[in-house]
Image (spheres, grey):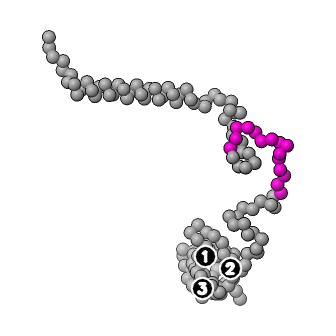
C-alpha cells in the first residue's frame, strides 16, 4: 500500500477549515432564527414613559399632561428670562472675498467671529457696530450685526 499524500499539517488545516465553516453555518442559522422579519408592528413598537425611559407598555392616557408650546425651552441654559444684550464694538478684520471677519467688543475687549450672513449691511475694518453674541460651532460669534451711524 502507498502512503497518503496528505501530511499531518494538511490534515490539521483541513480540520480547522471545516470547523470554521460549521461555526459560520451555526451563526447564520442563529441570526435567521432571531430575525424580526414578519413580526407584528406592536411587537416592534417602543414607548417613552413620563420619565423619558423606553418601555414596552403604551403610556396611560389618564396620566397625560397638557403642555403649552410657550413653556418649551429649546436652549441649553436655563436662564432664558434675560433679554439678549446688545454690545458695541469695532470691526478689527473683515475679508470681503471670504465673507468673514472679527469684531472686538468695546467693553470687554473680547474678539468675536462674524460671518457675512450675520450682517445687516456691509462692513469694513474700523467700522463701529452693534451686535449680539451667540454660541457657534467653534465658540462664541457675533450675530445680528448692524453698523452704527
SS for callout 2: strand
Q: Nearer the viewer, residue 96 or 112?
A: 112
Whether residue 91 can be seen here: no
Q: Return the residue at label 3.
A: 109
Please tell me how crowded label 1 is: few (under 14), some (14-19), or many (20+) other residues with Cα within 10 Å.
Answer: many
Q: Main secondary structure of the magenta part?
A: loop
Q: Quadrant of the C terminus?
A: bottom right
Q: Nearer the viewer, residue 28 or 92?
A: 28
Residue under the point 53% across and 28% down: 32
SS for callout 1: strand
Q: Return the residue at label 1.
A: 114
The answer to whether residue 146 is above or below residue 3 is below
Residue under the point 66% across and 75% down: 133
Q: Mark 3 or mark 1, which has the lower sequence index?
A: 3
SS for callout 3: loop
Bounds of the magenta segment: 54-68
Residue 48 at x, y percent in the picture:
72, 45
Residue 65 at x, y percent in the picture:
83, 50
**Mark pair 2, 3: CA separation:** 14 Å
**Mark pair 1, 2: CA separation:** 10 Å
Please tell me how crowded label 3 is: few (under 14), some (14-19), or many (20+) other residues with Cα within 10 Å.
Answer: few
Asked whether residue 110 is drawn in magenta, I would say no
Residue under the point 65% across and 86% down: 107
Q: Mark 2 or mark 3, which has the lower sequence index?
A: 3
Residue located farthest toward the front when viewing the structure as drawn = 51
Amino acid at each position: 500500500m502507498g502512503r497518503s499524500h496528505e501530511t499531518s499539517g494538511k490534515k490539521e488545516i483541513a480540520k480547522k477549515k471545516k470547523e470554521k465553516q460549521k461555526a459560520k453555518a451555526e451563526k447564520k442559522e442563529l441570526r435567521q432564527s432571531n430575525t424580526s422579519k414578519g413580526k407584528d408592528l406592536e411587537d416592534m413598537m417602543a414607548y417613552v414613559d413620563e420619565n423619558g425611559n423606553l418601555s414596552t407598555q403604551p403610556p396611560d392616557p389618564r396620566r397625560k399632561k397638557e403642555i403649552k408650546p410657550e413653556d418649551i425651552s429649546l436652549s441649553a441654559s436655563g436662564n432664558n428670562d434675560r433679554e439678549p444684550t446688545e454690545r458695541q464694538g469695532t470691526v478689527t478684520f473683515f475679508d470681503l472675498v471670504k465673507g468673514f471677519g472679527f469684531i472686538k467688543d468695546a467693553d470687554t475687549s473680547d474678539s468675536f467671529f462674524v460671518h457675512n450672513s450675520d450682517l445687516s449691511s456691509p462692513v469694513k475694518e474700523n467700522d463701529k457696530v452693534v451686535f449680539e453674541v451667540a454660541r457657534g460651532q467653534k465658540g462664541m460669534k457675533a450675530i445680528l450685526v448692524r453698523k452704527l451711524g
